[in-house]
Amino acid sequence: MGYIGGHIDTTVLVALLVAAGGLVGTTAVYQAASSELQSTNADLQAENEELRAELEATEATLETREQELNETRATLQTREQDREQLVTQLDETEAELESTESELAAAENDLAEAEAELADAREEVATLETDLADAEERVDELEDENADLENEVSELESDVSALESENAALESDVDDLEAELEQCQAEES
């Protein structure tokens, strides 16, 4: 084969053709690979953008969840404090209840004793009322008896007065009889 400047060996020509073909093939492969790489790169960038957006959304969600968690912890701490206060109040209330129950038991005992004393006092009052009724009945009987005795005394005083008058009359008669007797005796002597 002939061309400008001389004669080219077939082997060299084949080598050059192979080299040129390799370069063209390599370029074609490179372009195809580059095009595929660009396409893959674009896909990866799009996916990366999606992942970034998802990451941002996840970070925002995480931040929201962390805020909610902190709020929940604060609420839980408040609830725990409230629970502790309620437990303390419950303990105090139970202690007050126990004290009140003791006071109530003591008051019930006092009431039972007072009721027993009241029952005894009522019995005593009933006994005293019976005794008083008996005494009033006895007083009435004694007043009647006294009235009868006063009448009897009055009658006896009348009898005594009459007997004294009769006695005085009899003494006068005795005196008169003694005087007569003395006079008779004097006349006989």
Image: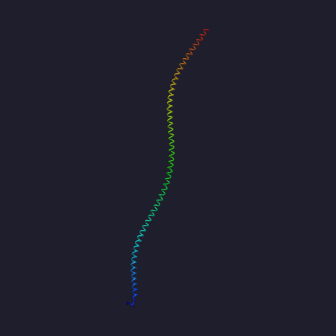
Q: Which quadrant would the C terminus be assigned to in this image?
A: top right
Q: Taking 184 as reference, is 148 left or right? A: left
Q: Nearer the viewer, residue 113 or 65?
A: 113
User: In the rendered view, how is the structure colored?
Assistant: rainbow
Q: Taking 120 as reference, is 184 left or right? A: right
Q: Taking 95 as reference, is 53 left or right? A: left
Where residue 31 appears, as percent x and y from the top left, is 39, 79
| Farthest residue, direction front | 11
Rendered view: 13 above or below 59: below
| Farthest residue, direction bottom | 6
Where residue 170 appears, as percent x and y from the top left, is 56, 16
Q: Nearer the viewer, residue 74 or 33?
A: 33
Where residue 56 appears, as percent x and y from the top left, is 43, 68
| Farthest residue, direction right | 189
Where residue 10 appears, as percent x and y from the top left, is 39, 88
Rendered view: 186 above or below 52: above
